[in-house]
Amino acid sequence: MAQITEVKLLDDLDGGEAAESVSFSLDGKSYEIDLSEKHAAALRDAFAPFVSSARRAGGSVAASRPRMSARAGRPREETTAIREWATANGLEVSARGRISSTVLEAYENRGNAVAAPEPVAEPAPEAPAKPKRRSRKKATAEA
């Protein structure tokens, strides 16, 4: 079954057909209102003297909050490949979350360096045995 969903904007001032949604901020609060072309022009005209004398503050709200994928920097397929490579090469890597810089560095240099021999773990020296503590015998008083 096919469905068609139609969204109609209604002017928030008079209930007629709206042409656009207008966003604005005042006193640190953001607002959005659906307006017809006539009302949107009137709002912009009312703000015009204030906007022309104002200075811009920061970027837009959307620009100040980057999406997660933009912050991650690597596509999901690449992080999956890095995890698989690290696991196959005996490096510890979590199944989720951030990949450590040492794993990333090893992955990026995987073709450049000659395979280094794995360090040989030497057994830790045994600590000298501590002498056993002797219990003290109570002195008996002879009289």
Image (cartoon, rainbow, N blue to C red):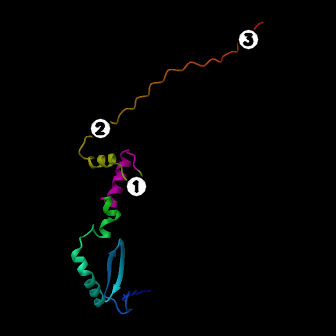
Q: Which residue is mark 1?
A: 97
Between 112 and 17, the residue placed more toward the observer is 17
The residue lying furthest to the top in this view is: 143
Please tell me in which quadrant of the rendered image residue 30 appears. Answer: bottom left
Q: Amino acid at mark 3?
A: Thr
Prevailing secondary structure of the magenta residues = helix
Q: Which residue is mark 3?
A: 140
Which quadrant of the rendered structure holds the C terminus?
top right
Among numbered discs 2 and 3, the one appearing first in the sequence: 2
Percent x, y for residue 1?
44, 86
Q: Amino acid at mark 2?
A: Ala
Please tell me in which quadrant of the rendered image residue 16 appears. Answer: bottom left
Q: Residues within 10 Å of mark 2 (few under 14, many from 20)?
A: few
Percent x, y for residue 111?
25, 47
Please tell me in which quadrant of the rendered image residue 28 appears. Answer: bottom left
Residue 76 disc label: none
Between 14 and 88, the residue placed more toward the observer is 14
In this image, 105 relative to 10: left or right? left
Relative to 93, does residue 133 appear above or below in the rendering? Answer: above
Residue at the spot 37% in from the left edge and 45% down from the top edge: 91
Q: Amino acid at mark 1?
A: Gly
Magenta residues, start to end: 73-93
